[in-house]
Amino acid sequence: MQKLEKSPLIVDFVGGAVGHRFRSGEGRGQGLAKAAGFSAGVTPDIVDATAGLGRDAFLLASLGARVTLIERSEQMHALLAEGIERARAEGGRYAETVARMTLIHGDSRELLAGLAPQVVLIDPMHPPRDKTALVKKEMRLIRDIVGADPDAVELMQAALEAAQNRVVLKWPLRAEPMAGIRKPSHQIIGKSTRYDVFVKAKIAAPAG
């Protein structure tokens, strides 16, 4: 097996911005949770098809969702596995949260159909922005590892086929809609990000 390069990137669910958001308990009112279909009595099962640093997956899992993370980069997958293990070792709510996270190494385009997910979240490497300073160092490091996602449209098409209830595309606020896919059912707008939501069916609350 090839030796993975040591990366300055670290997946940290305990410290930093993720830990702060987790401890402050922003809850189901945040844009990502609304986009993913959380509502009274409804906690969807979610596949994060572009896991990256796992931050969105961790926050969704902290709200009670079971989240399957798919990451095709071997190096990024290894960083995620280390981050999940650190959170597990921290114990308490961190361990409870990562217990709801399942990490898979593979290509989402091939795996989604077999998972029959309720909700698929896709956060591809975003198109380069015009007239902006260099992308933040962390994003450059991620791009160095995972590449530019030239097959993001194929992934969206696979997700729209496989998802039972909805697909959520996380996209830069002012970016043009992703070409080659249908218009979203609605959008949820954040400060610098928007969520394009493609609804297929209502998520039913569990019986009982």
Image (cartoon, rainbow, N blue to C red):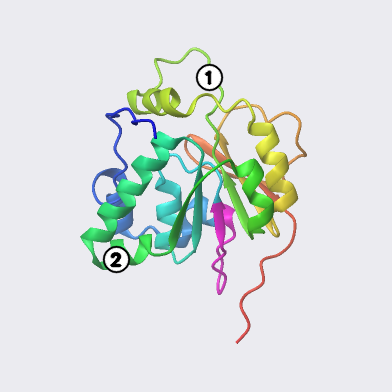
| Residue at far front of view | 1
**Could you tell me what secondary structure mostly forms the magenta stretch?**
loop
Q: How many marks?
A: 2
In this picture, which residue range is highlighted in magenta?
35-47
Q: Nearer the viewer, residue 75 or 208?
A: 75
Say if the magenta span includes residue 9.
no
- Viewer-proximal residue, 65 or 69? 69
Circle 2: residue type = Arg
Quarter of the image where the C terminus is located: bottom right
Query: x, y (%) of residue 99?
Result: 38, 64
| Residue at the extreme top | 131
Q: What residue would you read off at disc 1?
A: 128
Residue at 56% over, 23% down:
127
Determine crowd level at label 1: few under 14, some 14-19, many 20+ residues with C-alpha closer than 10 A: few
**Residue at x 53% of width, y 19% of height:** 128
Is 37 one of the magenta-colored residues?
A: yes
Q: Is residue 74 visible?
A: yes
191 or 178, which is in the foreground? 178
User: The N terminus is located in which quarter?
Assistant: top left
Judged left or right of residue 16, residue 169 is right
Question: How far apart in space, not on screen, are marks 2 and 1 (Cα)?
Answer: 37 Å
- Mark drawn on residue 93: 2
Residue type at numbered disc 1: Pro
**Image quarter for residue 62?**
bottom left
Disc 2 to disc 1: CB gap under 8 Å: no
Q: Please state if 53 lies on the left or on the right of 177 as rendered.
A: left
**N-terminal-most mark, 2 or 1:** 2
Q: Residue at x 77, y 39 (%)?
A: 182
